[in-house]
Image: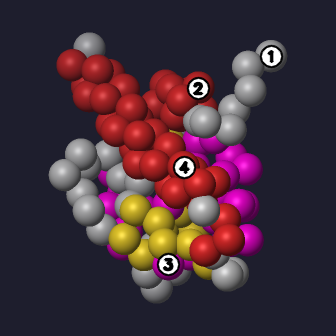
Amino acid sequence: MQLQAQRARHSAIASVHRTMNERRKNDAPEHFHGSITCECECHRAECGDNFEIALDDYEAVRAEGRRFVVAPDHQDDDELMIAVEPSYSVIEKVGDPGRDAQTLDPRWTKP
């Protein structure tokens, strides 16, 4: 039960980072010329890593509510590695953490 609570907490923290990136992108779209500076969307509350990601790549990640962009080596062992780029990786949360992440996705619309 403790592990399940920890995983839910990790999903919530990662979702806060993702929401901050969404706000940054939506608040000043005129500042982005093909790329966006993202903050790492890992589960570490204290993480302050940032990296550049092409807007098209960012949008592809955002199309899946269980996916996040993280700094290199910031994934958990129980997360699925989707893509590895030089300055970031794309991970997918699976199982209950994945469902939690999708529910917390600011782009997810409830039926």
Q: Viewer-nearest of labels 4 and 3?
A: 4
Tell me the residue at 41%/40% (across/down): 16
Residue 29, image x, y percentages: 66, 65
Residue 52 in the figure: left or right of residue 60: left
Distance from Cα at disc 3 to Cα at disc 1: 33 Å
Mark 3, residue position:
52
Q: From mark 2 to mark 1, how far is it between C-alphas?
A: 11 Å
Q: Which mark is residue 111?
A: 1
Q: CA distance from mark 4 to mark 2?
A: 17 Å
Q: Position of residue 11 (x, y in %)?
A: 40, 35
| Mark 4 → mark 3, Cα distance in angstroms | 16 Å
The kind of residue on which mark 2 rests is Thr
Upstream in sequence: badge 3 or badge 1: 3
Q: Secondary structure at mark 1?
A: loop
Q: Is residue 47 left or right of residue 99?
A: left
Task: Let me know if residue 66 is in the magenta part.
Answer: yes
Q: Report the span colored magenta.
A: 52-78
Q: Is residue 45 magenta?
A: no
Residue identifier under label 4: 23
The residue tagged with tag 4: helix, strand or loop?
helix
Q: Could you say which is closer to the camera, residue 28 or residue 35?
A: 28
Q: Would residue 80 be seen by someone viewing this image from the given angle?
A: no
Pointer 3 local density, CA inside 10 Å: few below 14, some 14–19, many at least 20? few
* Residue at position x 26%, y 62% in the image: 48
